[in-house]
Amino acid sequence: MFDLSPADWTAVALSLRIAIVATACALPFGIAVGWILARRNFWGKTLLDGLVHLPLVLPPVVTGYMLLISFGRRGPIGAFLYDHFGIVFSFRWTGAALACGVMGFPLLVRPIRLALEAIDSRLEDAAATLGANSVLVLFTVTLPLALPGIIAGVLLCFARALGEFGATITFVSNIPGETQTISAAIYTLTQVPGGDAAAGRLVLVAIALALAALIAAEVFSRRAATRFHGE
């Protein structure tokens, strides 16, 4: 369908790999933060909500720079991880996954929070009266009922991670085969004479992948609305 070069296919495969890893790693944190925001009232809740959504309003380059100075080899977190565990994020595909996970995190948390808020607490109370502890209630009642919202958040996070550019290129640069995602490959091709055709083909691939994820997210969001509100 798309006449792509081996280097282009490498960028597509790397983008999918990064987006999948970023979403999978962000999911447990997204569920935890979504549950805290939906079920707990505490001092600083508004601040936490603002911090969660901050990547949506900050310039992606700013987020990438903050990741670089924090998780780079000389950064406080990056130096600790490298010295004690040999983990390196900067200029590696794992760093691209980290950047994509951070950028997609707000879109992951929001649907999960809304799904949790829509759950009738009486169902959880009924499970508790039957002898289920809080952990059992969470995994057998709460999360299954919130599953449509969780899936919608996962797909939105995946779509955002798939198209991330600014934070990624700032944090891990644009290294072919290592950190060059679809977005970075398109940027590179636009800087090369005669690269417009190849860039256009990658644009079509990016649109197809992102559109598929967004359509899937919309389908699950409607199912969640029908399930919880009868809309």
Image (cartoon, rainbow, N blue to C red):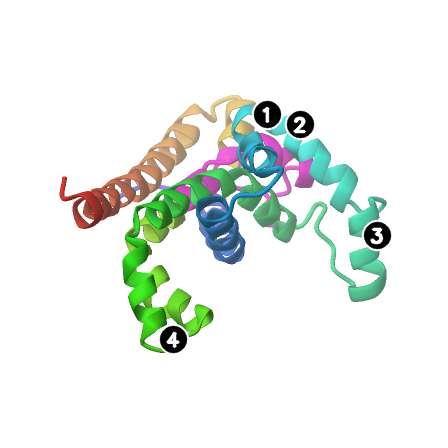
> Would you name the residue on which mark 2 appears?
62
Which label is found at residue 132? Answer: 4
x and y percent of residue 190 in the render? 51, 23
Question: Would you call the spot at circle 2 few (<14 residues within 10 Å), some (14-19), or many (20 or more)?
Answer: some
- Amino acid type, callout 3: Ala
- Amino acid type, callout 4: Ala
Sooner in the amino-acid sequence: mark 4 or mark 3: 3
Label 2 or label 4, whichever lies nearer to me, is 4
Residue range (magenta) = 156-184
x and y percent of residue 64 in the render? 66, 34
The question of residue 197 being in magenta is answered with no
Q: Find the distance from the CA under tag 2 to the CA under tag 1.
A: 7 Å
- Amino acid type, callout 1: Leu
Task: Label 4: state its secondary structure.
Answer: loop
Q: Residue at x 19, y 50 (%)?
A: 227
Q: Find the distance from the CA under tag 2 to the CA under tag 4.
A: 45 Å
Q: Are marks 2 and 1 in contact (CB under 8 Å)?
A: yes
Task: Label 3: state its secondary structure.
Answer: helix
x and y percent of residue 168 in the render? 60, 37
Which label is found at residue 79? Answer: 3
Task: Label 1: state its secondary structure.
Answer: loop
Q: Residue furthest front?
A: 129
